[in-house]
Amino acid sequence: MKEVTLGIGGAAGDGLDKTGDTFAKTASRLGLYLYAYNSYQSIIRGGHIWLRVRMGEEKVYSHGDHLNLLIALNQDTLERHAREVEPGGAVLFNSDKLTLDSSLFEGQVLPVPMPVRELLKPLGRTLPVMQNTVSLGAAIFLMGLDFEMMAEVLADTFQHKGPDVVNQNVQVAKAGYNYAKEKFVPLGYEWDFSRIRRPFITGNEAMALGAVAAGCKFYSAYPMTPASTILHWMVAHADRCGIVVKQCEDEIAVANMAVGAGLAGARSMCATSGGGFALMTEAVGQAGMIEAPVVFITVQRGGPSTGIPTKTEQADLNQALGASQGDFPRIIMAPADVTEAYYTAAEALNLADKYQLPVIILSDLLLSEHPETIERDALKPDLVIDRGQLVTEWPEDNGTYKRYAFTESGISPRALPGTKNTVYVAPTDDHDEEGILISDEYTSPPVRRKVQEKRMKKLEGALKELPPPQIEGPEDADVTLVGWGSCRGVIREAAEILRSEGISTNQLHFKYLLPFHAKEALEILNRCKKTVGVEVNYTGQFAKHLRSETGFSLDDMVLKYDGEPFEPAFIVNRVKEILGGEALSLEVTREEAREIAYHYIRTHLKNAVRPASIEVGNGVSAGEPTWCIELVSRNGGAKNGDLFVGQRTGSTYAWKPVSTVSQD
Amino acid sequence: MEMTISLPISTYESIIDPDWCPGCGDFGVLRGVKMAAGKLGIKPEELFTVSGIGCSSNLPGYIHAYGVHSLHGRAVAVASGIKFANQDMNVVITGGDGDGYGIGLGHFVHAMRRNLDLTYIVMNNQIYGLTTGQASPTTMKEVRTKSTPRGNAEMPINPIALAIVSGATYVSRAFSGEPRHMADIIAGGIAHKGFALVDVFSPCVTYNKINTYPWFKKRVYKLEDDPDYDATDHQGALNRAYEWGDRIPLGLFYREEQPTYEESEPAMKEGPLVHQKLGMEKELFDDLMEEFV
């Protein structure tokens, strides 16, 4: 497949997001498919932001393993990522400020220094952020994209600032484009532009849109990465969509307000990340007990505690399964991609209403924040809205209305508060059919048994209507990759690569985590030859859940917990090792040693040096083999000293500056 | 204007009898809520009582009206959600001092500055009753309780002062020993557009042997009986909120007309959310999708 991956790196505050947007919209409007991932830090200015946008003529399912074109907005990016650019690619940078020495990149990569000041001089007063636009203009030329489309995107972006600003931005981009045209030849990508304009949308946006389209009327939230963009989308569109969006004092209020709104009869939803969800858990149980329909979205990020706030993980499954004390029915779903996020929000609202219980959507940072191109008609507005069994009127002579009537299905027809003759109290104490407490003056064991069975029975009905998991790919494959949630796309690509290398691979993916299709899953798993779980956590939480539901133990695991999402090659390589009987190595790789050195340089050496050669160390007695990382001056490249990092533990053992030796 | 037809308090008779200790101040509050609702002609299906956890929080079970007996400390948040969803309901929160001024204090303060049209009745007995007699946030200093055997070392919360400075637009106090006065104060709170606090001295006859009916009877007086008292004077109200000791004021401390939060919410202008049509017109949907292209 024809594809190219652009990387843009810089510091927070460099305006990287807008540059990425302009590029993505340009490519997307030309009819290409994109998938972007922004690796960022919990910082408003500074730090390292690393955006990768992969595009192809066919749908791409992850940000991939490649880097073909790099736009470096700071020196740090050149030093860290220029070497990752593949042969035939190019590195663009502002040569007024940055230097790219030949040790930083591989041969057959084109350095493209941009004399930004000189190029912008004829254009009068410009903003520093316009260096991005110059480089992007040049990149558009090198990638063989259409400049007119970029100009159109810039016009749309800056329309609200007036024609002068639009014009200036277009000219700035054109200056970069023309400069590249004059000095370089394109990298050789020839595209067949369909010019079909497809949406480029994130999981959070899709989920918010899906919820509103399905009649969500109340949304509460407390800001928390990576869930906040749901709040932002919701509030930006609240007036037009007729939805109340409430930012609350804390997540406890968020959850309890959502429960109140759900109980009163509005379709109600709230969202947070793991830490906030921890605060919400008592209210999840409350919704279970009083049978209030509410949708809780928890967007996982690296944990525990504050964890790695801007990084991805799938380690909150246990928390979702165990949220709140006691046994109560809940539905837990983990959508796999942006399109599924849209429909899952609508489905969750329906299930919550139909079964009168809390529904938890387990998303994660990768799904929530990465944008991707979807088909124009992938998201449809005519969603099914199923409010379940509602009692809209109750004649006075109908006898007592029982809010929690014991029924075969466990579902008690619900009268919304305000309905005449159906007055009831929804108690968090356990209660009988009428909502009268059973544990205050006298406890009634049989009533407790029957009300508990009534509530739990609802899950049997729910399970029947949820679609069971299915094998994707060849039925009789030698390897089955088992995953859940946002990993489906990357696993799919890994399976494709494995198949292309002659390893017959298929995948089994789970969206519905509770209630669980234990019978169907076990039947499939029993037919599989070798099963490998793939999840973004340390303990294999889903594999354990699968085992507890089915008794089936997966043969092996591919796990990742460094904060970054899977890339296809990571899965492919580990699967090949597993098939070859190779034990998992936890040793620090050469690349990781470089990153550990960067961390040390930032924290101890004021960013004055950079890592150069990395060799197996000697001379440091650390009780383990070490990497010896040579650090050199960032300008000039003179040797500054050696840093020793343990290959097994990753501990930083010694920093030996050259200066202390030579200058003494 | 529609005529208010008052309803007899039997309208709100529940099939459940309260399980409070004989003599508990909460009986008076229950009667006061019924009287207030009756006076305002609120039908049972138009009344939503919301409580947290504690002795007093059992109240919704004892009144014929919609209710939710929610979590400890969370009644105000749950009630806010109910009000957002259905502003036609008269939402009355009924809880205790531990529930509202202890574990739920954060929600209490934020609800006041938000000024949703809610009425919050706090049955303040200055003790934790249901858990058998530990200090509460309003237990007076040096008072010995099961959890403060050497005497309470902490200052009590002053709910009236806190409410006045937090933006509550109706701040009042009542006493279970004065049921008619209490019913008027509660009715005033429900009728008030905005957040109304009714702090009620509701003696715990089992665990609080200090702040008893006679203790209060000796001290309380009504602000309404003071012809010079001006309940719209913010600073004056705050001064009076600090009066404690030989004389303790009851009645309406402070009142202010402010727009409610609901009034600022465009989505609620079309009527209660629960009655609004669900789903999205294709035209709007297409417009929203265009933003992603």
Image (cartoon, coloured by chain):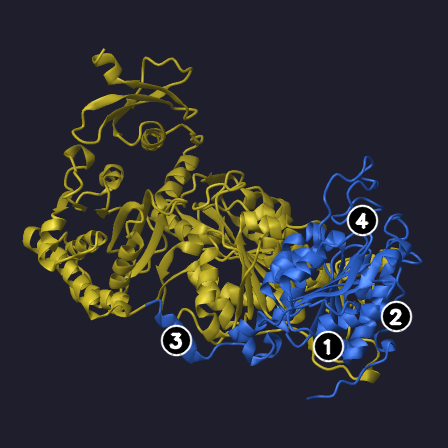
Chain colours: A yellow, B blue
| Vertical order, B160 against B132 (above or below) | below
Amino acid beneath label 4: Tyr
Q: Which residue is the site of mark 4?
A: B128
Query: In the rendered structure, which disc, 1 or 4, sits on the residue that comes first in sequence?
Result: 1
Label 2 or label 3, whichever lies nearer to me, is 2
Which of the labelled discs sits on residue B286, or is there none? 3
Label 3 or label 4, whichever lies nearer to me, is 4
Q: Secondary structure at mark 3?
A: helix
Amino acid beneath label 1: Glu
Which of the labelled discs sits on residue B46, or is there none? 1
Query: In the rendered structure, which disc, 2 or 3, sits on the residue that comes first in sequence?
Result: 2
* Chain at tag 2: B
Amino acid beneath label 3: Asp
| Distance from Cα at disc 1 to Cα at disc 4 | 31 Å
Label 2 or label 1, whichever lies nearer to me, is 1
Q: Residue at x 71, y 57 (%)?
A: B241
Marks 3 and 4 share the same chain: yes
Q: Residue at x 53, y 44 (%)?
A: A315
